[in-house]
Amino acid sequence: MPKIVHVVGAIIHNEEGNILCARRSSNMTFPGYWEFPGGKIEPGERPQTALLREIKEELHCDIAVGQFVEETIYTYDTFTVRLETYFAEIINGTPIAYEHSELKWVPCSDLNSLEWAPADIPAVERVIRQCKKEFMSN
């Protein structure tokens, strides 16, 4: 059975309703694919706490963690990812790509235009559905 890596991702949105997307750099696994920023959950750490720490390390900004979005288990060739995603918003700082090759604010309606890491796709689909509901109710 492949090793299971428990990770967490932040679906960071701004006031315009755009989502912060991060492109994996050449020194990461699956370079060039897009993902929601985040990282590994340390033993004994709550997902929300891990997200605060990881975003501070990766993007050098502070976030407020919001509603749970999706849990995905995806098996790659050599390992399995258990990804928990949460909505979040930046409360201090401006995100800077220290580990990723690129950061981009993307409207919900354009999220499908990016080539996402497979584990992130269910969360992307959930976000798109949720944005459509909110747009239709306004």
Image (cartoon, grey):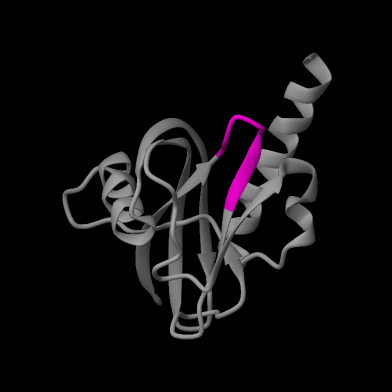
Query: What residue is at 43 percent from the left and 48 percent from the top?
Result: 94
User: Hey, which quadrant is residue 128 in on the image?
Assistant: top right
> Closer to the camera, 109 or 86?
109
Numbered label tally:
0
Left of 83 or right of it: where is 131?
A: right
Q: Residue furthest right?
A: 136
- Tell whether 39 sits left or right of 83: left
Q: Residue at x 65, y 64 (%)?
A: 116
Report the residue at 35% width, 47% height from top.
61
Judged left or right of residue 97, residue 46 is: left
The residue nearer to you, when weighing 23 against 16, is 16
x and y, in percent, of residue 21 in the image = 59, 56
Reply above or below: 101 against 11: below
Segment colored magenta: 13-20
* Along the viewing direction, whichever of 122 and 102 lies nearer the viewer: 102
| 66 with respect to 128 (left or right) | left
Does residue 103 belong to the magenta stretch? Answer: no
The residue located at (61%, 44%) in the rendering is 19
User: Could you tell me what secondary structure mostly forms the magenta stretch?
Assistant: loop
Q: Residue furthest front?
A: 94
Query: Looking at this rendering, what residue extends furthest in the left direction?
Result: 44
Would residue 15 be counted in the magenta stretch?
yes
Quadrant the N terminus occupies: bottom left
